[in-house]
Amino acid sequence: MSEPVNVSIIYYSATGNVHALALAAAEGAEKAGAEVRLRKVAETATEEVVNSRPEWAQHVRDTADVAEVSHADLEWADVVLFGTPTRFGNPVSQIRAFVETTGPLWFTGKLAGKVYSAFVASNTAHGGQESTILAMANTFYHWGGIIVPPGYTDPVQFQTGNPYGTSHTAGGGATPSDLTLQAARHQARRAVETAAALKAGRAA
Ligand SMILES: Cc1cc2nc3c(=O)[nH]c(=O)nc-3n(C[C@H](O)[C@H](O)[C@H](O)COP(=O)(O)O)c2cc1C
């Protein structure tokens, strides 16, 4: 029997939307037979700033039991899925802060050859979802990653319409719809299937 695919889902979420996408991705990856680690990146905002928005403070409390990401989670993974809110068209600084600690792994080739994919939430549909995912991809290129986007590889993609990665529009307090969660599951499944084929091929 072949070894299972290891998936690290690394995310940041202030108010819960990206967290919901991350949970759906975890479900999709597990259903595809993968071992999954769900990991949040460290908060860098001060307590005062977090507490200035009750929904942010609440989400921090709600996810207190989610482990913080470490380099070991990157090393262990065959697939790394990143989830980030959009901040002025880019990934959040909390994700960047983590990424910028990975020099030693990158330098020793430990980030290369893995499957990478990203998903996002923003307040508006044209508020930078694609640019945020593409900005994450800049890092994947530097790492020598194998970028596996969802494309239009499942009927759900024609309904949700973002081939770059699962995207949720959170404006007005909207939480991810069933369709968007389905897209996140599909994105994770496709990444796992690709990594499984790679893993089997490399072991042969
Ligand atoms: C500083 C800042 C910048 C933001 N920039 C954008 C933006 O460029 N486009 C957009 O649609 N939403 C923007 N937003 C809204 C967030 O993307 C949105 O609240 C987030 O995706 C919700 O995800 P979460 O619930 O997981 O935190 C911004 C929010 C903040 C606080």
Image: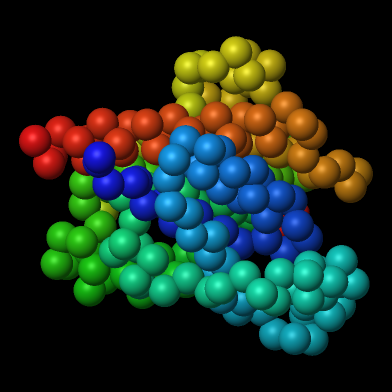
- Residue at 63% over, 19% down: 156
Q: x%, y% of residue 142?
A: 26, 52
- Residue at 22% over, 74% down: 104
102 over 196 or under it: above or below: below
Q: x%, y% of residue 8?
A: 44, 56
Between residue 181 and residue 105, name the one nearer to us.
181
7 over 160 or under it: above or below: below
Judge from the rendering whether residue 96 lies leftward or rightward of residue 138; answer left or right.
Answer: right
Image quadrant in which you'd find residue 15:
bottom right
Image quadrant containing the C terminus:
top left
Q: Is residue 117 visible?
A: no
Q: Residue furthest left?
A: 204
- Residue at 24% over, 68% down: 105
Between residue 128 and residue 15, name the one nearer to us.
15
Image quadrant containing the N terminus:
top left
34 over 60 or under it: above or below: above
Q: x%, y% of residue 3?
A: 27, 47
Q: x%, y% of residue 11?
A: 56, 59
